[in-house]
Amino acid sequence: MQWKLHKVFAFIFRRPVLLSGRLKRMNLNMTVTVYKTIAAPTEAEFKDKGSRFIAFAYPIHSIADVKRYVEPLREAHHKARHWCYAYRLGVEGTQFRANDDGEPSGSAGRPILGQIYSAELTDVLVVVVRYFGGTLLGVPGLIHAYKTATAEALSVAEIVEKNVEKTVFIRCEYPHLNDAIRIAKQHCAEVIEQDLQLDCRLTVRIPLANYDACVAAWRHTRFIEVNSEIVGEDS
């Protein structure tokens, strides 16, 4: 009896783990239609044993933005000892990097990146500038300091949810232009470029969640041509 009860308890406590893993795989296979980032730059400071850790969080769109923010901070805080940073880019956050900038390996960049992941953010850069206070903190102390400074900078940021979008090109004769624009508005799509002549051409950005329905509505009219071959995914 004792052996059977042990098996029953083992089954009960293992089952949530299995379900959790299954749900995680299911989520990974789902199409991402929205993502979270920060609306504007923020700043926060953490102090420990005389050292100052000033965290700067920025919304970014490309790797080029990283250098654009890091270099001015190096100049503005030229008396600092380290300028460590991490960033995460892309709708699914698959492009990332962590930089320790001379701190012990894994003690700065990774804790910064970890906080970006914990907040479920992407298209974000966090730079933590360290002014050395004369006392060594050790690796655990550094991890705590960089983690805390980053968490505080992100905690004061305005988190915004953005749509993943696709860009398409549509074409119609001028008398049908109002119908084309009406369908776009019904699906929260945005006309970002237009060439209005007898033969009208529009560049339209559509939320991914509404993409299929919007394209189907245009094609259903039979007089709006949709170029779905030249499609870009935007964030």
Image (cartoon, grey):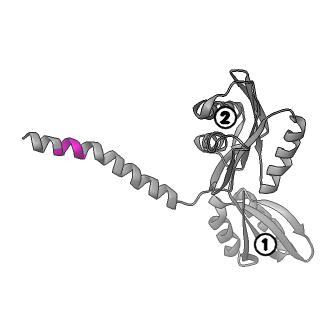
Could you tell me which residue is drawn at 72 percent across and 71 percent down?
Answer: 231
Cβ–Cβ under 8 Å for marks 2 and 1: no
Q: Residue furthest right?
A: 197
Most frequent secondary structure within the magenta stretch:
helix
Q: Amino acid at mark 1?
A: Phe
Could you tell me which residue is drawn at 64 percent across and 28 percent down?
Answer: 137
Which numbered marker is on residue 35? Answer: none
Circle 1 is placed at which residue position?
Answer: 169
Instruction: Magenta stretch: give its range.
Output: 7-11
Q: Is residue 126 left or right of residue 147?
A: right
Image quadrant containing the N terminus: top left
Could you tell me which residue is drawn at 65 percent across and 50 percent down?
Answer: 35
Query: Which quadrant of the structure image shows residue 31?
Result: bottom right
Give whichever of discs 2 and 1 has the lower sequence position.
Answer: 2
Which secondary structure lies at badge 1? strand
Q: Residue furthest left?
A: 1
Q: Is residue 186 visible?
A: yes
Which secondary structure lies at badge 2? helix
Give the CA distance from mark 2 to mark 1.
Answer: 46 Å
Q: Amino acid at mark 2?
A: Tyr
Residue 131: image location, x then y, percent: 78, 29
Q: Nearer the viewer, residue 109 or 156?
A: 109
Residue 172: image location, x then y, percent: 81, 76
Q: Is residue 113 left or right of residue 102?
A: left
Is residue 12 depicted above or below 157 in this figure? below
Query: Which quadrant of the structure image shows residue 105?
Result: top right
In reply to whether residue 112 is colored magenta, the answer given is no
Which numbered marker is on residue 146? Answer: 2
Q: Nearer the viewer, residue 152 or 132?
A: 132
